[in-house]
Image: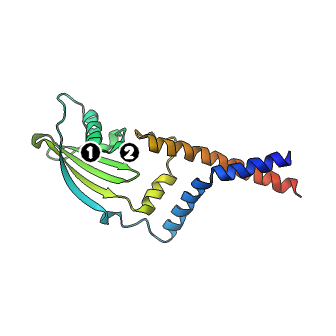
Amino acid sequence: MLGLVKKAHTYAGLLTFLNLAVYGIVGLSASVGAMQGDAALRRTFEQPFTASANSSDKQVAESVCRTIGLTLALPVQSAAIQHDADGHLLLDLWHVNGHHRVTVLESEGKVRVEEFRSSTARYFDVLHMTTAVFRSGDWRMNAWAWYNEFAMWCLGLMMLSGVWIWVAGR
């Protein structure tokens, strides 16, 4: 029985290794203050965009995301959809690679995009807190979220089996 528990302990540790490495990077980055300064990684651009007639704000927002290649921000949450003082649709899109503030200028047939890219430290910070509770429209984030969930269960198994091994060895 002890041999089986030791194997379970070893495999659980191996299966959660990548997860623990990400947690370690985030912990070290936070302790040296490396997660600050994302604003320096900023650019603004405009891109042609035409909204289809009679579309809801949410449909326009999701169409904008697909047009500018922001599948990581899908599905667009209701809290991200706003209007500015001039009545333009304003989208505040957060995702693992950073933050995009998009203004839909329907009368001009374009979108103005302010892109704030995440630093490497911030990227790992978002990865470390992503679980299956967060629904993403991108298969890569969904795969990571489910692995993260699985790795947390493996970590629990590793701790329990570690205690079992310690008690059995006494």
Mark 1 surroundings within 10 Å by alpha-carbon count, few (fewer than 14), some (14 through 19), many (20 or more): some
Report the quarter where the C terminus lies: bottom right
Query: In this rendering, would 167 be left or right of 140?
Result: right
Q: Residue furthest left?
A: 107
Q: Quadrant of residue 48?
A: top left
Q: Quadrant of residue 117?
A: bottom left
User: Vertical placement of 74 versus 3: above or below?
Assistant: above
Q: Residue at x 63, y 51 (%)?
A: 16
Q: Residue at x 76, y 54 (%)?
A: 162
Which sits in the foreground, 165 or 11? Answer: 11
Is the Cβ of the residue at disc 1 closer than 8 Å to that at disc 2? no
Q: Quadrant of residue 54?
A: top left
* Amino acid type indicated by mark 1: Ile
Query: In this rendering, would 143 be left or right of 157?
Result: left
* Amino acid type indicated by mark 2: Leu
The spot of residue 46 in percent (x, y) is: 18, 50
Q: Residue at x 80, y 47 (%)?
A: 5
Query: In this rendering, would 13 be left or right of 87?
Result: right
Report the quarter where the N terminus lies: top right
Q: Which residue is mark 2?
A: 72
Q: Residue furthest right?
A: 170
The spot of residue 136 in percent (x, y) is: 42, 40
The spot of residue 91 in percent (x, y) is: 27, 45
Q: How is the image coloured?
A: rainbow
Give the number of the disc on residue 111: none
Residue at mark 1 to residue at mark 2: CA–CA distance: 11 Å
Q: Which residue is mark 1?
A: 68
The spot of residue 105 in percent (x, y) is: 15, 44
Q: Circle 1 — which element?
A: loop
Q: Circle 2 — which element?
A: helix
